[in-house]
Image (cartoon, helix red, strand yellow):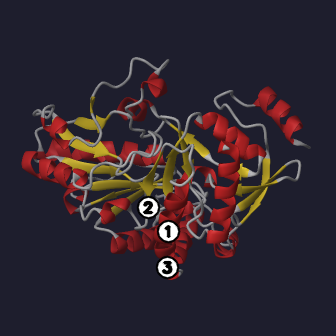
Amino acid sequence: MHNESWKTKAQQHLAPTYAQYPIAITRGQGCYVWDANGKRYLDFATGIATVSLGHCHPKIVNALIEQAKTLWHVSNLYYIPWEIELAEKLNQLTFSSAVFFCNSGAEANEAAVKFARLWGKKHKNGAYKVITTTNSFHGRTLSMIAATGQEKVKRGFEPLPSDFVHIPFGDAKSAEEVIDEKTVAIMVEPIQGEGGVIVPPDNYLKELRNLCDKHNLLLILDEVQTGVGRCGALYAYQLYEVEPDIFTSAKALGNGFPIGACLVNEKVKSAITPSSHASTFGGNPLATRVALEVIKVIMEENLLENVSKMGKYLKKELSRIPKIKEVRGKGLLIGAEVEDNQGVVKKALEKGLLLVPAANNVVRLLPPLNITQKECDKALEILEDVLR
């Protein structure tokens, strides 16, 4: 079947929740994908910062095949060795003391808020409100669209949970003005991805950390898009030398295989009790075995260094393209502000380059962490041609 046939069939059978581009992607290899018509595309979208080692990476494929032949699912009624090993590895590489596994970023953020409330009940007289920021994005569950600071995400789903307070992103002082006795946590993205690749001032996270310490609050970082090497450190908080109390991870953690994680420090761990939260598929052998291999490849192949190197190169070259108004981001989470981002993304697709739009007329470039300069040059050539 060709692209048009898949489009027709999708319109007949799928819930119309997506405004999709008119191609059906049928296979991928490395930093390229092919559509149903056989056309090849250079993938600088990577499933929205998810397929960070490229498509069908041989080590990830082998890990999945090996695990698929061994054990798929048993549930958390029993100990799952691969889940335990992945938690141990993440705890060793971060500040974390404990990990809860689920299936997506939204679920990980839900867990973060639930764990914060458990801590609030035990240590802060039942405090439950969470401060988040305007322009943020935290997921599509009811409570996470309430947490999200973009009105377009909320429309049609009112009334929403009302226990989230929004303040301007990048302004720590505004947080102090809304803190009261019911406030339990501040939750932010280290860099706003969906909001337009907005990078806050360098001292922003430290100021939030100090504020949380002053008022006995938890600091929650949503690292669903910024994590697993995307910004040049395994997790972006490590670039700022700030430790949150909770942070979340998903997307690239499984290189496209669904997995999410909520990581907590010792004081939050102490408030969590058996049966207080659960996930049927969370921590299953397939997902955790794949994620173990993802972390191993990133660390053993020194991909964080490549992220920093290629990120600097792309930002420098993008800034030379006349019709790009501004370039921002860290590592390989890069946003280029243009006149019409949707138009640019569509024209780039026609020329064989996949990009991702974001708010404020931003085009996101989210290549695999192991991208080469040759592939970056090809993407730059297509983008410059589109803008010309």
The span from disc 3 to disc 1 (Cα, nearest Å) is 9 Å
Q: Position of residue 341 (x, y in %)?
A: 59, 37
Of residue 320 and residue 208, the one placed in the foreground of this image is 320
Element on which disc 1 rests: helix
Q: Give the side of residue 161 with respect to residue 65, left or right.
A: left
Q: Residue furthest right?
A: 1
Which mark is first along the chain, 1 or 3?
3
Label 3 is placed on what type of residue? Asn
Q: Position of residue 46 (x, y in %)?
A: 62, 55
| Residue 171 placement: quadrant | top left
| Residue 178 placement: quadrant | top left
Of residue 236 and residue 14, the one placed in the foreground of this image is 236
**Mark 3 Cα-neighbour bin, 10 Å: few <14, some 14–19, many ≥20:** few
**Quick check: 270 above or below 79?**
above
Residue at image point 18% right, 35% down: 174
Which mark is first along the chain, 3 or 2?
2
Nearest to viewer (mark 3 / mark 1): 1
Element on which disc 3 rests: loop
**Quick check: 171 above or below 334?**
above
**Quick check: 207 above or below 86?**
above
Residue at image point 85% right, 41% down: 3
Pointers 1 and 2 in contact (CB under 8 A)?
yes
Label 1 is placed on what type of residue? Val
Residue at image point 61% right, 68% down: 371
Q: Quadrant of the N terminus?
A: top right
Any part of residue 307 in sight: yes
The span from disc 2 to disc 3 (Cα, nearest Å) is 14 Å
Which mark is first along the chain, 2 or 1?
2
Any part of residue 276 in sight: no
Residue beneath disc 3:
302
- Mark carried by residue 231: 2
